[in-house]
Image: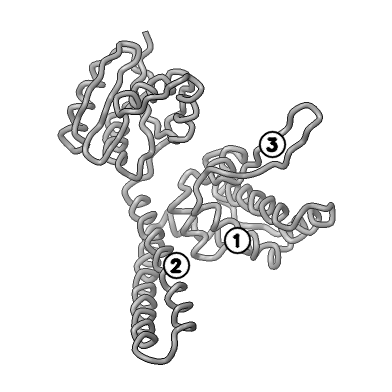
Amino acid sequence: MEITVGIDVSKAQLDVHVHPAGEALVLGNDESGVAALIERLGQLEGLVSIGIEASGRYERLAVAELAAAGLPVAVLNPAQVRHYGQAMGFRAKTDPIDARLIALFVAAVRPEPRPLPDAQTVELEALMTRRRQLVTMLMAERMRRQQAAPGLVRTSIARSVTYLEDHLRELDAHIDKTVRGTPVWRDKEDLLASVPGIGKTIARTLLAELPELGSLNPKQIAALAGLAPYTRQSGKWRGRSFIGGGRPAVRAALFMGALVAARHNPTLKAFRDRLVAAGKPKLVAIIATARKLLTILNAIIRDRKPWQPA
């Protein structure tokens, strides 16, 4: 008998459901609770998959420890589980019900477990996230400084701008030391940056947020980045395709890279110009350019060969 397990995560606890036995557990979302969970799941014969929803990073401890124990754990998209529940007629919502729903979803879909990023990659992701936060705050403060009248308020904003600029320089220096001091990351960054349109910030965002780069096929990597087009059609009706899902930070970085590449990368500029000449809207052409850019970067990391102009 094949067994699947659903885990609903909150800040304080883990609600666990074992399907089809119907066994339910409630454990603390801490080291001792996760250790007890691993011990119990290790006793299950026929365990084929464990599903756990992504929930604001509260799932990280459980996922890391389950994976380290060699258990088949997959992190799930909450929207997919929710839609499955709606299709199955689940109307009530409690943590135990959610855990059962996840176990049923895993049994039906069999999501593929993905390797977890190591501790260094998690740390780099946190650093790049913090960098984006600082840049956002700095842009907002600069805008306020421009609009503020001379006086105490403008002086206060100017001090804030100076502090954020200094903090951003310190963070960039730390990120640079971290990436350039790690041989694998240094080599990958050099490969990515060999493509016109890819600078340090975009390359490091991809290193941190898309560690699967180079290990998946073009369709899979595009879906992971949220750049895969979704077609809508029924009979003779043809709706517009659209993109969505994936990892927003990766998609935003590639979009900016495509804007630069459409001007300075001869291959991608020609590709974008052909789409515009064929009547495609400029935004659609840029999105397609971003997807092609990602395909190129994926192949470069896979083959470990730098960019070669056509």
- Given residues 130 and 221, the one toward you in this image is 130
- Given residues 256 and 9, the one toward you in this image is 9
Task: Assign a secondary structure to mark 3.
Answer: loop
Q: Position of residue 27 (x, y in %)?
A: 20, 29
Residue shown at the point (48%, 82%) measured from the top left: 147
Which kind of residue does numbered mark 2 sit on? Thr
Q: Position of residue 279 (x, y in %)?
A: 83, 53
Between the C-alphas of marks 1 and 2, the distance is: 18 Å
Earlier-in-chain disc, 3 versus 1: 3
Which kind of residue does numbered mark 3 sit on? Thr
Q: Which residue is mark 3?
A: 231
Q: Which mark is residue 136?
A: 2
Between the C-alphas of marks 3 and 1, the distance is: 25 Å
Residue shown at the point (38%, 19%) measured from the top left: 48
- The image quadrant of residue 149 is bottom left
Task: Assign a secondary structure to mark 1.
Answer: helix
Task: Assign a secondary structure to mark 2.
Answer: helix
